[in-house]
Amino acid sequence: MSRSARAVLALPVVLLLAAGCGAAGNGSGDTGSAGTTTTAVSGPGKNATLAAMVPADVAKDGKLTIGTDTTYAPSEFVDDNNKTVGMDIDLGDAVAKELGLTADFQAASFDGILAGLSAGKFELAMSSFSINTERLQTVDMVSYFTAGTSMAVLKGNPAGLTLDTLCGHTVSAQKGTTQADDLAARSAKCTSDGKLAITISEFQAQTDVTLALTSKRAEAMLADSPVVDYAIKQTNGQLEKVGKSYANAPYGVGVAKNKGELAKAVQGAIQALIDDGTYKKILDKWGVGAGAVTKSELNPQTSS
């Protein structure tokens, strides 16, 4: 991820967020309940066949505990009413209903969610995680969306930057994301070519990544394409995108490898939502229909 905007990211607020976001998304790594979200878009309800695939230890309390980093609008963020909302939140709610459960979203720092999943802290991880080889070594992943990486700069691109001219400049990205890894690789190439390294400003919360750019502490930022598009809209013309998105990859719901048929149940639930049209309604609600997929896959092959 990506991922990978996350804590009150209804982003006109970006300029007001000089210090992160509230308890649900402050980027500190603390985990607390973000509450169960009610959505305007819902599927047909419990699918008995899929519900029967859910392990007993998951189903026993009637909840599906989902780790998410709530600073990544429009995928997952905290709105002005202190509610956790977003494309992933609506989709996670709908998946839980298909499985006969209620989604219980738990806010956590992005780079700690998959470790928490493997440790049993969460039952699913749903936070705009790009599926890659490294993540598939530790967790199972169920695909549900496609996104690439985009670069944003201040309006007018005062430094005249492109993806190929970042050497010697300051670029912000969220910690633990594919964008942070990408910048590290680009910086290494800069120095191997005898140029100045990229100064990489990493933050726990995407809101702080965006704030670094709008406050001119960074000259560019890298984030997932839907996140950059949303930030541009929400910052009232302060930002613009440079070039096209690249390195498109599927997002995946993370499932611990010791959870029996849970991953297959999640895959079946997402496919059911795709087939009945609920999935499209959710993506259209958040303006991210361009990333829609027609097939959900368990542990799809990836080039990275």
Image: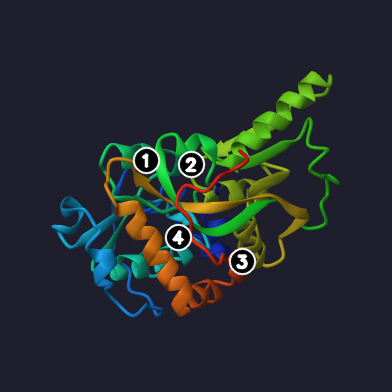
Say which label, 4 or 1, has the lower sequence index.
1
| Picture coordinates of residue 95, whole percent (x, y) | 35, 66
Q: On residue 234, which mark appears? A: 3
Tag shown at residue 77: 4
Earlier sequence position, callout 3 versus callout 1: 1
Q: Picture coordinates of residue 213 (x, y %)?
A: 66, 48
Q: Where does label 2 land, which residue? A: 204
Q: Which numbered marker is on residue 29?
A: 1
Q: Residue at x 30, y 46 (%)?
A: 31
Amino acid on which disc 2 is placed: Gln
Tell me the element at label 2.
loop
Q: Secondary structure at mark 3?
A: helix
Answer whether residue 144 is visible to the viewer in this image.
yes
Looking at the image, is mark 1 or mark 2 earlier in the sequence? 1
The Cα atoms of the two marked residues, 3 and 2, are separated by 20 Å
Mark 4 vs 3: CB contact within 8 A: no
Position of 17 compared to 56: left or right?
A: right
Quadrant in the rendering for residue 119? top left
CA gap between label 4 and label 3 equals 13 Å
Query: Who's the residue at 40% across and 59% down the image?
Result: 267
Q: For the residue labelled by badge 4, is the local secondary structure a helix, a strand or a loop?
A: strand
